[in-house]
Image (spheres, rainbow, N blue to C red):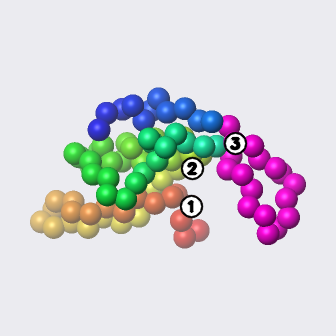
Amino acid sequence: MDDSTSDCQLNAGEVDYEFESNEVPEPFSVVDDQFVPKVGMTFTTLEDAENFYRNYAKAAGFSTRVWSTNRKENEIKNQLITCSRERK
């Protein structure tokens, strides 16, 4: 995976600040579809995955953190990256 995600462009979304509670507001920003995570994505290294999700989160207007890491014999087997505000 290359660093092309750091060059992603945001398209300003229209936001209506006056809305009823049952209305869904427009997103504050729209991330180009090529930079949005998709089920089944694979990465060569853990660092590539961390960079991809960090850049996506930045472009989408939030931040990420590592929620949990599973290891086997001191080698990372699985790592859960989540929104930094998850479970707060």
What x and y, as percent, mark residue 88? 58, 68
Residue flagged by tag 1: what amino acid is it?
A: Arg
What x and y, as percent, mark residue 37? 42, 51
| Helix, strand or loop at mark 1 | loop
Q: Are marks 2 and 1 in contact (CB under 8 Å)?
A: yes
Residue designated by label 3: 13
Tell me: 27 left or right of 84.
right
Tell me: 52 left or right of 29.
left
Q: Quadrant location of the N terminus?
A: top left
Q: Which residue is at 39% across, 44% downward?
A: 52
Tell me the distance, in whole angstroms, between the alpha carbons under discs 3 and 2: 16 Å
Q: Which residue is at 64% across, 43% downward?
A: 29
Residue designated by label 1: 85
Tell me: 14 left or right of 34.
right
Residue flagged by tag 3: what amino acid is it?
A: Gly
Q: Nearer the viewer, residue 67 or 44?
A: 44
Residue flagged by tag 2: what amino acid is it?
A: Phe
Q: For the magenta stretch, what is the residue range?
A: 12-28
Residue designated by label 2: 62
Determine which quarter of the picture holds residue 22: bottom right
